[in-house]
Image: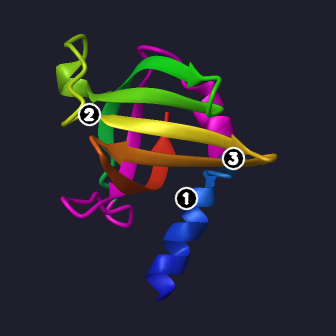
């Protein structure tokens, strides 16, 4: 249970900054490192295992008030976005409550940490 609570605390604050602020600072072509947990695999924050990603395009839905940033592995930078393999970061603003989540394809993942 302690691990789950620590992960939740890390997901809300990344290196002393709010995750929403980190999301807003991402620019196309920027290289970042992301640690995550999912059913298919995970990167351990404790072992320093961050994966390298390149920020792709940014989209916004006025209807749902959702902003999305696409992330591609650094090894595939410049290639066409593949929805099944690449990641998306989602920022939602519902009634003044801002949340950031992540997904791989159609499956949600737990965001553990971001470094730029």
Considering the numbered disc 3 on the image, is that residue within a helix, a strand or a loop?
A: strand
Category of crowding for the residue at label 3, using alpha-carbon neighbours closer than 10 angstroms: few (below 14), some (14–19), many (at least 20): few
Residue 31 is covered by the magenta coloring: yes
Residue 38 picture quarter:
bottom left
Give the residue displayed 26% in from the left and 33% down from the top: 86
Identify the mark nearer the N-term, 3 or 1: 1
Q: Is residue 78 above or below residue 22?
A: above
Labels 3 & 1 near each other (Cβ < 8 A): no
Q: Using the numbered discs, state the Cα–Cα distance from disc 2 to disc 3 in whole angstroms.
A: 25 Å
Residue 55: % across, % down: 41, 23
Residue 52 is covered by the magenta coloring: no
**Range drawn in magenta:** 19-47
Can you tell which mark lies on residue 86?
A: 2
Q: Which residue corresponds to mark 1? A: 11
Q: Which residue corresponds to mark 3? A: 17
Category of crowding for the residue at label 1, using alpha-carbon neighbours closer than 10 angstroms: few (below 14), some (14–19), many (at least 20): many
Residue 80: % across, % down: 21, 14
10 with respect to 40 (left or right): right
2 with respect to 22 (left or right): left
- Which numbered mark, 2 or 3, is in the foreground of this view? 2
Labels 2 & 1 near each other (Cβ < 8 A): no
Q: Using the numbered discs, state the Cα–Cα distance from disc 2 to disc 1 in whole angstroms.
A: 20 Å
- Which numbered mark, 3 or 1, is in the foreground of this view? 1
Q: Of residues 12 and 62, which is closer to you in this image? A: 62
Considering the numbered disc 1 on the image, is that residue within a helix, a strand or a loop?
A: helix
Give the residue displayed 49% in from the left and 69% down from the top: 7
């Amino acid at each position: 249970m302690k691990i789950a609570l620590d992960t939740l605390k890390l997901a809300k604050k990344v290196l002393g900054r709010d995750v929403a602020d980190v999301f807003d600072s991402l620019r196309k072509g920027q290289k970042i490192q992301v640690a995550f947990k999912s059913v298919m695999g995970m990167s351990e924050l404790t072992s320093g295992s961050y994966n390298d990603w390149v920020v792709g395009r940014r989209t916004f839905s006025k209807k749902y008030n959702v902003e999305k940033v696409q992330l591609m592995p650094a090894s595939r930078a410049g290639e066409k976005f593949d929805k099944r393999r690449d990641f998306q970061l989602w920022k939602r603003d519902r009634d003044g409550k801002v949340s950031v989540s992540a997904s791989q394809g159609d499956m949600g993942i737990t965001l553990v940490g971001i470094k730029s």
